[in-house]
Amino acid sequence: MTSYTVINPATERPVTQIEHTTAEQTDAAIERAARAQEAWRAVAPGDRGRLLRRFAEEIDAHVDELAALETTGSGHPVGAATWEAGQVRDVLAYYAAAPERLTGKQIPVPGGLDVTFKEPLGVVGLIVPWNFPMPILSWGLAPALAAGCTVVAKPAEMTPLTAIRIGELALAAGLPEGVFQVLPGTGSVVGQRLVDHPLVRKIVFTGSTEVGQQIMAGCARHIKRLTLELGGKSANIVFADADIERAAASAPYAVFDNAGQDCCARSRILVESSVLDRFMELLEPAVKSVRVGDPAAADTEMGPLISAAHREHVASYVPTDAPVAFRGSAPDGAGFWYPPTVLAPVAADAPAYTEEIFGPVVTVTPFADEAEAITLANDTPYGLSGSIWTENVGRAVRVARAVETGNLSVNSHSSVRYWTPFGGFKQSGLGRELGPDAVDAFTDVKNLFIATN
Ligand code: NDP
């Protein structure tokens, strides 16, 4: 059996060692989940909801502990990590209301009665990335459990600690054995087995577009249901008629949240040429005032990157001759630190402009008019997120409808809320998570005709 040493990204010191789950153990867990599902789907909807509420309460009682684990094991600033643990609680509580609302339809037909049922799919395999270990786990877990599915989750190899603890808290809350299992391990063993095992009826994958493509191909062999949340290269579009002060003040938070390791990062700022100079004047102090440092300190806004290898990857987008307009600060010494960095002007074919960096690096590009802003925003294979800054409501709606992306905000840097749908256009994904309809994605519709004559 192999193992992995979790490293604190802020200190580079080992935190703990985690044993990897083997392929045989993964198969055994999947079989346990399939057996548990027979009983779980039969739990009365009100009782399933009650158990999910208890699970949410158990998380609530351990928010500080979970946040501290994420700070140590993933380098998230404690303020952000506390919000993330709270999100797990809130997502569980939100979907606790779903089992009693999982209704079918009665459809008029001659000679009888036609009704539909939303049947749980069975065992769901959840494959989670390292950037937001807690929220992303909960986005798949809560609606799957609410639908009557059981869940086998694989956290990312580098960040398994909070998922393992959440698995323990599920049992403490009274969820039956086998309903939710957490299997730390590698993508190539545990992840692959979830994709290949015929008893897993759906995969929920969040991660890179490249691995997402492999998983989609693997799922095709079984016609396995699949939700994909993949990469992004989102635009933050600032028109001349916007509140430029607000747009510039919020731009760092739109891209440097979680040190830019965020699929929704608005990593391409597009600014109408006539206000470019003013915008850059305002952006510089905003970037320089982002508080980068010890993630355990309450006022820290940005922590380190996840690993030395990832820092090297991020740095490769900023070679020595890169057009660095200005940068924020980052601590020296131990830790995988990288300062918030603004590149301008960038060539249209520069990798920093075309590829997802997944780090605190943003490019600024001018545009002449609305048509060019839309063309630039859409000139990417991704389509996950984005923002539009304008005081003109007509333009806001027009541009929002034209930008090929799944989640947009107008005059705000954020568009992710657990009670609204989330997902990507183009190569950013398939299907939607969150919002009131997410439970349906863990069911298949059964149609039943009952003759009455
Ligand atoms: P990866 O695609 O490398 O990994 C994601 C998960 O998949 C990990 O748990 C990984 O395991 C696992 N995995 C890797 N290979 C396989 C395989 N062959 N079969 C099954 N599972 C596998 O992504 P990262 O962890 O590097 O995450 C960063 C990416 O995630 C970025 O591109 C980002 O945009 C995207 N992302 C998208 C979001 C969205 O909602 N659209 C949200 C957050 C991130 P392990 O690493 O343990 O080997």
Image (cartoon, grey):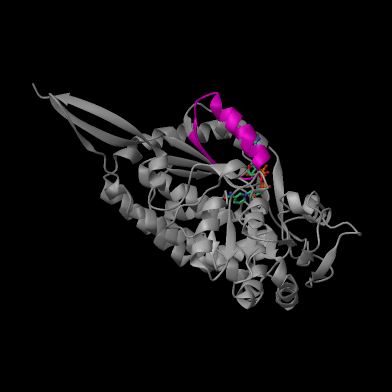
Determine the residue positioned at 84% across, 58% down: 318
Q: What stretch is highlighted in magenta?
A: 202-228
Report ligand 1 position as a quadrant.
top right
Q: Is residue 448 left or right of residue 153?
A: left
Determine the residue positioned at 68% across, 61% down: 270
Is 416 in front, or is 312?
Answer: 416
Provide residue 453's location: percent of width, then percent of height: 8, 21
Farthest residue to the left: give it. 453
Determine the residue positioned at 67% across, 47% down: 380
Is 376 in front, or is 152?
Answer: 376
Provide residue 446's location: percent of width, then percent of height: 30, 30
Q: Is residue 341 left or right of residue 83?
A: right
Is 273 in front, or is 321?
Answer: 273
Provide residue 356's location: percent of width, then percent of height: 71, 50
* Residue 216 located within the stretch drawn in magenta: yes
Q: In this view, does 321 lie to the left or right of 243?
A: right
